[in-house]
Every structure is written in structure tokens, then in C-alpha cells.
């Protein structure tokens, strides 16, 4: 199941073949708000199938960083 707000999108991705496309799509949806707020984006993997793309004040504007939170 997927969840979204103006600041983040959480995705459940079960197939590796869908991973890049769905994450790119989520980043694209948040791009306008990232530009307005001059924030970067953080992609967090919280389980083998769960990813959250969110705006982050800790990530430099124009940058996307990755984080793994389930190991």
C-alpha cells in the first residue's frame, strides 16, 4: 500500500523491475515542493519492500540521498 503527503511518499515495491521507475516517479512528484522549500530529498528503505521519499532540511537543496533503516 502507498501513502503520500505534500512532504513524503511511502511506497511498497515488491518487484525489483519496478523499483527505479516508482522511486523516480515519487521524486518527481515532490520536486515542486522541494524547490519551493529549497530542501533536498531523502530516500529511506525501512524494509525489503518499503521505501519513503521525503523532503529533508538535512539534505542539501538539489541533492537526493539514500538511507537504509532496516538492517
Image (spheres, rainbow, N blue to C red):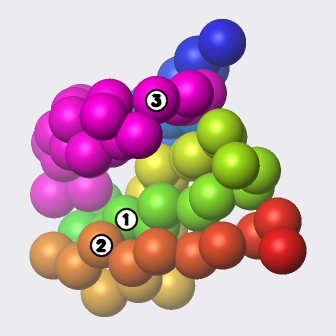
Disc 2 to disc 3, C-alpha distance: 22 Å
Quadrant (top left/top right/bottom left/bottom right) for the C terminus: bottom right
Disc 1, disc 3: CB below 8 Å?
A: no
In this orientation, which residue lies closer to the viewer: 1 or 5?
1
- Residue 33 is covered by the magenta coloring: yes
Q: Residue at x 26, y 45 (%)?
A: 20
Disc 1 to disc 3, C-alpha distance: 23 Å
Horizontal side of 22 relative to 5 (left or right) equals: left
Q: Which residues are magenta?
A: 11-36
Upstream in sequence: badge 1 or badge 3: 3
Identify residue for label 1: 41
| Residue 11 in sight | yes
In this orientation, which residue lies closer to the viewer: 47 or 34?
47
Identify residue for label 3: 15
Q: Residue at x 58, y 17 (%)?
A: 2
Q: Position of residue 51 (x, y in %)?
A: 58, 46
Disc 2 to disc 1, C-alpha distance: 5 Å
Horizontal side of 47 relative to 29 (left or right) equals: right
Upstream in sequence: badge 2 or badge 1: 1
In this orientation, which residue lies closer to the viewer: 40 or 12?
12
Secondary structure found at label 1: strand
| Residue at the extreme top of the image, as rendered | 1
Q: Position of residue 16 (x, y in %)?
A: 41, 40
Disc 2, disc 1: CB below 8 Å?
A: yes
Front label number (1 vs 3)? 3
Identify residue for label 2: 64
Amino acid at each position: 500500500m502507498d501513502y503520500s503527503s505534500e512532504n513524503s511518499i511511502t511506497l511498497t515495491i515488491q518487484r525489483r523491475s519496478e523499483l527505479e521507475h516508482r522511486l523516480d516517479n515519487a521524486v518527481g512528484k515532490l520536486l515542486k515542493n522541494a524547490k519551493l522549500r529549497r530542501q533536498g530529498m531523502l530516500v529511506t528503505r525501512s524494509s525489503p519492500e518499503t521505501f519513503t521519499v521525503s523532503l529533508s532540511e538535512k539534505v542539501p537543496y538539489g541533492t537526493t540521498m539514500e538511507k537504509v533503516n532496516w538492517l
